[in-house]
Image (spheres, rainbow, N blue to C red):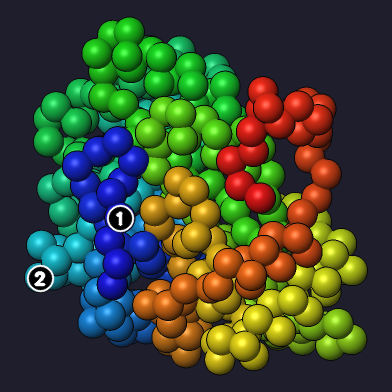
Amino acid sequence: MEYRQLGRSGLHVPVLSFGTATFGGGNEFFDKWGAVDSQAGNRQVDLCLDHGVNFFDTADVYSDGLAETILGAALKGKRHQALISTKATFAMGDGPNEKGSSRYHLVRAAEASLKRLQTDHIDIYFMHGFDALTPVEETLSALDDLVTSGKVRYIGCSNFSGWHAMKALSVSEKYGLARYVVYQGYYSLIGRDYEEEIMPLALDQGLGTMVWSPLGWGRLTGKIRRGAPDQSGRIRSGGAEGGPTVADEFLYDVVDVLDAVAKETEKSVAQVALNWLLRRPTVCNLVLGARTEEQLKQNLGATGWKLSPDQIKRLDAVSEKVPVYPYWHQRDFPALNPRVVG
């Protein structure tokens, strides 16, 4: 397993981590993603550890805490072998203080996650989204206290806009508070918006990137092809709810090239799509989810080999889209605004 440094920190992480959003299926929303029970979760965790994937990503809202509970039980007696990241911010109840990134909510959320995970520390604690109602200073001061107490090792942000992340980094610098070292966000061959604002910021500020949904809500598994829409899996069950729409023809064009490259490399479509991401600047980790052990085994084959420059170029070209303003305007002046990729 290849390891990479996590942003501007001393922590090294495997390039693949295992995401547990499929654990539990404790409510209608997450049941569409998957309903991996404790027994199956134990097997998947053991399979990951056997393949050097010792990094597990979860969140308190995944199946209302059930995903953390299943993961904690699966790692009992093995916690010393593993890295765990979890998240807070989104609602865990109906009360006005049971959501957000206030000091009140974060301290309670962290304590609850520690209990469910059966551990005394969280290796990486993410703000799951930006809370515009809580002062950034309050959020970062609370996180700094959690780091100082030893309950959290590193902090990260997820789903922030570029200015959200930059404001937080500037506040950390101004007051000497713990600093976000990693950004977790959506990025895939059919969703490259990340490259326009977040990637340049991550390069400039030394943020590592963990990619969630690297297969585009299951659209790049190889099951969906031109003339053969998928009849099973996450998309069919409605698991793409909440994600961006993807035009059929655009998806089919990308999958056509993925198919061709998969034949050339003797790899699967999903493995090619994941390997492409591992070649991108700032990316240090891909969060893999799996409804079954077979899916997990397939995805683990994304490492240990590299796409050729020509194959990367072809995948870049077919997945390219005109960016939103002002990025399309900046591209007209490459001498002043050189592109990060492509």
C-beta proximity under 8 Å, tags 1 and 2: no
Q: Label 1 is placed on what type of residue?
A: Arg
Q: Is residue 161 above or below residue 218?
A: above
Q: Residue 71's quadrant in the figure? A: bottom left
Local secondary structure at mark 1: strand
Does residue 18 appear in the picture of this structure? yes
Q: Which sits earlier in the primary sequence, circle 1 or circle 2? A: 1
Q: Is residue 262 above or below residue 182?
A: below
Mark 1 highlights which residue? 4
Q: Label 2 is placed on what type of residue?
A: Gly
Compared across the picture, whether 216 is left or right of 133 comes to right
Q: Is residue 260 above or below residue 332?
A: below
Task: Provide residue 195's location: percent of width, then percent of height.
Answer: 62, 43
Task: Provide residue 131's location: percent of width, then percent of height.
Answer: 52, 25
Q: Residues within 10 Å of mark 1 (few under 14, many from 20)?
A: some
Residue located at (81% from left, 30% from top): 332
Local secondary structure at mark 2: loop
